[in-house]
Image (cartoon, rainbow, N blue to C red):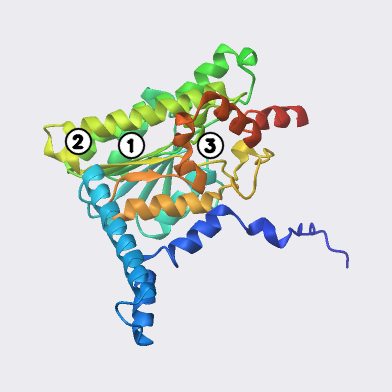
Amino acid sequence: MASNARPVEEKPWHSHLTIDLLVTVAQYTFLHPFVAWMIPLSLRAQLTPYTHTSFRLSVVYAASLTVFYFLSLLSQRIAHGAPRKVIHSEEVIVITGGASGLGLLLAQIYGMQGATVAILDVKRPREGEIKGVTWYECNVGDKSQVASAAQRISEDLGTPTILINNAGIVNGKSFLELTTRDIERNFHVNLLSHFHTIQTFLPGMLEEGRGTIVTVASVLGYLGSAYLSDYTSAKAGLIAMHTSLEAELQQSTNSAAKQIQMILCTPGQLNTALFAGLKTPSAFLAPLVEPVDIAKAISKMIDSGDGGHIALPFYAGWIQWLNVLPAGLQKIIRSLSGVDSAMAHLEKKK
């Protein structure tokens, strides 16, 4: 009998080799303090003298990594304060744009872990995709709808203590092609919705004396991109909003404000329907980010009770250094990366 299954596309072995994989391997091997201390211990096991150059260098190397590790922990504590205790059974989680993509994955993760989860979306999740999760039809770009949904969530589930702002849309048009409706819809969903949800749910977190707010922005908020002027403007606004709100909470005289953890997520190109068909310029330096990887990183930081910055893939965590380079070099790098031509090529294909 003939099979109707589509053949699986075979990729060359090196397609899975990325800079992110190399960095991850390094972090768990020779850049890990514990592993580094194995070197001088092994040398001593071979009766290498304490005065031998190899032993001294290995000790300096291991000690340097250890100091760097503890300084990183200190930096995290200074920047975001002490972690809060997160118990899934006691948390009420609200996820915007939770009917598909990254939002749906996060809803599934916490639904399976016994947390109380509510998703806000204009579309209903497909039957069987989520269990133990409650869907509320809501256009998060409309503050009155957010307020109405919040009241129902409070009555049905309790006071939300974790807010994951994930909803987003893309127009993908040139600057002059954007209509007023396109621009307004973009800012309502990609930027204003965060103001609506935070202003609605933050007071309840302050009353509870605990909370976590996750802002899903984009690396393009730092870079900008041709044919994405409205989208990147909104994402840049989110980064600024996150930074400003975090500073405001830390300086608040309300002690409960200091118990609110803020998490900023600035991923590279996600492998979702939002940018379907968009080809990444370098699979090695700028690989597609799988939603499951971002979901795991977000849930790990939420569960640890910490605040912080999540930037995947590897280059996304260092992209801000591009702005300190000479303007001419910046232009060359942008040209080589394809950040300004990718959307144009996608539009031509359509």
Q: Residues under labels 2 and 1: Cα distance?
A: 30 Å
- Disc assigned to residue 152: 1
Q: Position of residue 238 (x, y in %)?
A: 40, 29
Spatial distance from mark 1 to mark 3, Cα to Cα?
A: 17 Å
Q: Judge whether 195 appears above or below 85 on screen.
A: above
The residue identified by callout 3 is: 123
| Picture residue at 76% right of the left edge, 27% below the top | 348
In the rendered image, residue 334, in percent from the top left (x then y), is placed at 60, 31
Q: Are marks 3 and 2 in contact (CB under 8 Å)?
A: no
Quadrant into which the N terminus falls: bottom right
- Mark nearer the N terminus (3 vs 2): 3
What amino acid type should be assigned to the residue bearing mark 1?
Arg
| Front label number (3 vs 2) | 2
Please tell me which residue lies in front, 159 or 256: 256
- Disc 2 residue crowd, few under 14, some 14–19, many 20+, Cα 10 Å: some
- Taking depth in this image into account, of 224 and 318 the one nearest to the observer is 318
168 lies left or right of 38: right
| Residue contact between numbered discs 2 and 1, judged by CB atoms under 8 Å | no
Q: CA distance from mark 3 to mark 2?
A: 36 Å
> Which image quadrant is residue 94 in?
top left
- Dot 3: what SS? loop
Q: Does any portion of residue 144 appear in the rendered image?
A: yes
Disc 3 residue type (three-letter): Lys
Secondary structure, mark 1, is: helix
User: Which residue does the image show at 43% across and 29% down from the upper left?
Assistant: 140
Q: Position of residue 275 (x, y in %)?
A: 62, 37
Q: Is residue 278 above or below residue 228?
A: below
Q: Which residue is tagged 2?
A: 250
Query: Would you say 229 lies left or right of 317 here?
Result: right
Q: Position of residue 192 (x, y in %)?
A: 41, 24
Q: Amino acid at mark 2?
A: Gln
Question: In what quadrant of the picture does the C terminus appear?
Answer: top right
